[in-house]
Amino acid sequence: MESLETIRTFLGWTIVVHVVVMLLIFSALMLGGSAVRSIHGRMMGLSDEDLSRAYFQFLAQYKIGVWLFAIGPWVALHLMN
């Protein structure tokens, strides 16, 4: 069906966009760590330890969301074919 192929293509590009976003976030945290931590620490009033925990939790939840709402449905649609 044409509509299933369109949805598969959409989900495929969604996965690509989310992987790029995750890589950009990871790169910003690794390469500009002290500057990013300084800005976020002042904005939210958190210590470096709390920021590390928040960054890790955010990235973990983001990955789970991508798996649930993009990769899982994309795989299911491919298995249906």
Image (cartoon, rainbow, N blue to C red):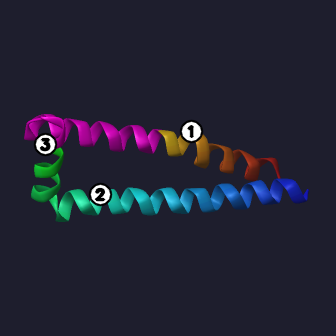
Residue 51, compared with residue 5, is above or below; it is: above
**Which numbered tag is attached to residue 78?**
none
Residue 58, compared with residue 3, is above or below; it is: above
User: Is residue 67 part of the magenta span, yes or no?
Assistant: no
Q: Label 3: few (<14), some or many (≥20) within 10 Å?
A: some
- Name the one closer to the observer, 52 or 81: 52
User: Which residues, given as a range, are shown in magenta?
Assistant: 43-64
Identify the residue under disc 3.
41
Q: Earlier in the sequence, mark 2 or mark 1?
A: 2
x then y, percent, for residue 10: 69, 58
Q: Nearer the viewer, mark 2 or mark 3?
A: 3
Measure how far apart labels 3 and 1 are at the Cα level: 30 Å
Tag 2–tag 3 contact (CB < 8 Å): no
Residue drawn at x 79%, y 59% is: 6
- Kind of residue sitting beneath label 2: Phe
Instruction: Indicate the quadrant where residue 58 lies.
Output: top left
Identify the residue under disc 2.
26
Left or right: 80 as drawn, with respect to 46:
right
- Main secondary structure found in the magenta portion: helix
Q: Label 1: few (<14), some or many (≥20) within 10 Å?
A: few
- Kind of residue sitting beneath label 3: Gly
x then y, percent, for residue 45: 12, 35
Identify the residue under disc 1.
68
Residue drawn at x 64%, y 60% is: 12
Q: Earlier in the sequence, mark 3 or mark 1?
A: 3
Residue 64, compared with residue 78, is above or below; it is: above
Measure how far apart labels 2 and 1 are at the Cα level: 20 Å
Q: Secondary structure at mark 2?
A: helix
Residue drawn at x 17%, y 39% is: 51
Measure how far apart labels 2 and 3 are at the Cα level: 17 Å
